Amino acid sequence: MKCPRCGSEMTVDSHRKYALQMCYQCGYMEGRDLGGAPAKGETNFSRMKGLNFNELVVFLSTGLGVDSEKVADWLDDTVE
């Protein structure tokens, strides 16, 4: 099953009372709200401010067509 939020392959998380599908890339769990449609006039920058680190990596790597590990390494680099 593909994740409706980021498109990655979801895996079965059986650590709960009942097993459900979970995406380990962005943290989406089966049956959760996707967050709704973006607000009118919302920019990509304002949307990125509300994402956690993993969601931001998936969002940028998908949009740029770059490997997600490279994006994560780039975001982890410190500015000197």
Image: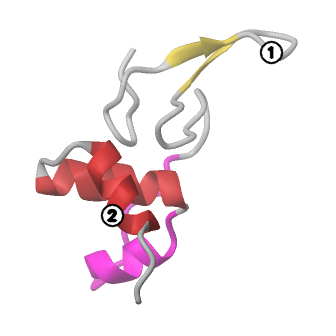
Q: Specify the label residue 74 is tagged with.
A: 2
Q: In front here: 56 or 40? A: 56
- State the extent of the magenta-drawn residues as a range: 34-51
Q: Is residue 26 left or right of residue 48?
A: right
| Whether residue 9 is situated above or below residue 4 in the rendered picture | above
Label 2 CA crowd tier, 10 Å (few <14, some 14–19, many 20+): few
Queried whether the magenta region covers residue 49, the answer comes back as: yes
Q: Specify the label residue 15 is tagged with.
A: 1
Observer able to see residue 35: no
What is the three-letter code of the residue carrying label 2? Trp
Q: Give residue 47's position: percent from left, percent from top.
A: 39, 73
Residue drawn at (49%, 48%) of the image: 34
Q: Secondary structure at mark 2?
A: helix
Q: In front here: 61 or 27? A: 61
Label 1 CA crowd tier, 10 Å (few <14, some 14–19, many 20+): few
Q: Give residue 78's position: percent from left, percent from top.
A: 45, 77
Q: Give residue 35's position: percent from left, percent from top.
A: 51, 56
Residue drawn at (65%, 16%) of the image: 20
